[in-house]
Image: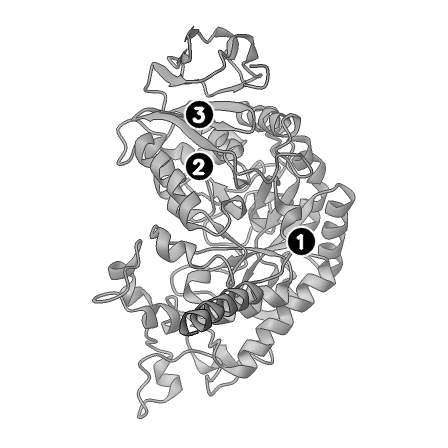
Amino acid sequence: MRTFISILTLLITIISAVASKSTVDTSQWLGRNIYFILIDRFAGGDAGCQNGMEWCNGNIRSVTEQIPYIKKMGFDAVWITPVVEQVEWRDNWNGTGYHGYWAKDFNKIDPHFGTPNDLMELSQTLKDNNMLFMLDVVANHVGPIHSLEDVANLADGINSVTGEQFHQLAHFEDVEFEEYLKDPYTMMEAGDKCWPNYEFGEGCDENVILEGWFGDLGDLNHEHEEMAGYLLKWIRNMQKTYDIDGFRLDTALYIPKAFLEKFQEEARVYITGEVVTYNETLHSSFQGPALTGLLNFPVTEFVKPAFSIGGSANFVDFAARLENQKLIYEDVTLLTNFVDNHDGDRFLTNHTVGQLKNALVWSNMWHGIPSFYYGTEVPAVAEATDCRTSQWDAESGEFLDGSETEIGELVTKLNGLRTEFGLTFGGEKAASLGSVVAADEEGWMAFERAGLMVVVSNEGAEKACFKSDCCPGEELLGLEGEDSVGVQCDRDNVCVELGGGIPLVFSMESC
């Protein structure tokens, strides 16, 4: 009897756990390819803008005007940085809120970016083009706070000068909130001990990560009932008002998972969370009841070194991480893979164009949702030391069209292959895990997915050999230079030449 009760209890526990998981329908995101835009720097901004920490006045309407350009390259989803009203005061170190991550009023659209009607028009234009709309949002913090005056100047609902809406870690009773603001306890004090692996324990305090401020950005108290209600009401309203298909959630690592679960439920659409850690156990714990998707930072750790010669990691390391993810994540098809983003040096600042091509072939053809950072297709932008350089001519303000550059043509071809082989949304293999590493060495990796074999390298390897039932021969598919690639087949062994560093894709369907 005791055994029966134990089994029954276990079954009830399992059923309850399954029932508690989010019921958000993520199917429309399977097979999508995202074009990621930093609004202030993409299109329509000021000629002569020096970028850096200042507003350049790129805007939502100009994003809408460039949807045909984005669609021409085969992208079927657009992610834009946050649009809520930003604090108008300057930060001590980082200038203005041009990037959108320093909220003053969550319920207003910042006039630098445009109007609510502009955002509605963008949403409708994307729908008319069968593209999904992803909006970046921040629920961890507001803009920089230096005084009670700054607090009072926030919007109603988040501007109490008692500071109850903020975490106040290490705020002693005999210290006024006004004094605390001069030197809030920040997570930066624990950052060096925690980042990038976040092994919580001695020297790395999870409480500091959750309740400490992110520098001088006012850290919102998600345990405070009114503050939590404000954020939950806001995200539901944003999704409904602007018909948003998905959200990218900034700084999700610093938000309690109990609140993230409620936030995901209120959003009712796919969320990919920014959890910046290379600790896969910690990273993967945010997918499931908390969030439906995650930006794939543990894999990104290996992208730049693997695709360089003599880097700190190679393709053996890279392949091992990719394969291991299938064992520990709830759904790897909902991880967002990327090569470049707005928070680090662009790939081309210390790699070649050939290495970039190989990295993009990996991110587009491996399972998951690829994200392509604006301007990667434009040499003047992709090679700039400022990763947020504007995509318009500095003198004329004219938009720089990169659709016919080497990279623009490559991503167009890759998106064409994805469509042809059923990997895009609606395709019969869009939801397929599929990707399996076939072979790897320090300088290259070969993987299979849904009838395709893909070979990528760091340009340093001369040949790749692996087992396959198929000899590619005439089946190499459309990437520049593939017609000159030598292929040798001996029974089930295939060797392909990589002397030119060309990424290869070939079909196995005719085998």
Residue 46, compared with residue 436, is above or below; it is below
Q: What's the residue type where badge 2 is placed?
A: Ala
Instruction: List x then y, in percent, for residue 176.
Output: 36, 89
Which dot marks residue 152? none
Query: Label 2 belongs to which residue?
Result: 384
Query: Label 3 belongs to which residue?
Result: 353
- Tag count in the figure? 3
- The quadrant in which residue 44 appears is top right
Residue at 59% x, 76% y is 230
Quadrant assignment for the N terminus: bottom left
Q: What's the residue type where badge 1 is placed?
A: Asp
Q: Can I make out residue 343 in this image?
A: yes
Residue lying at the far bottom of the rendered structure: 174
SS category of the residue bearing label 1: loop
6 and 468: which is toward the camera? 6
SS category of the residue bearing label 2: loop
495 and 115: which is toward the camera? 495
- Sort mark 1 into few (<14), some (14-19) or many (20+) by Cα contacts within 10 Å: many
Q: What's the residue type where badge 3 is placed?
A: Val
Q: Nearer the viewer, mark 2 or mark 3?
A: 3
Query: Label 1 belongs to which residue?
Result: 245
Label 2 vs label 3: CA separation? Answer: 14 Å
Q: Sequence order check: which comes first, mark 2 or mark 3?
A: 3
Q: Nearer the viewer, mark 1 or mark 2?
A: 1
SS category of the residue bearing label 3: helix
Q: Can I make out residue 144 in this image?
A: no
100 and 436: which is toward the camera? 436
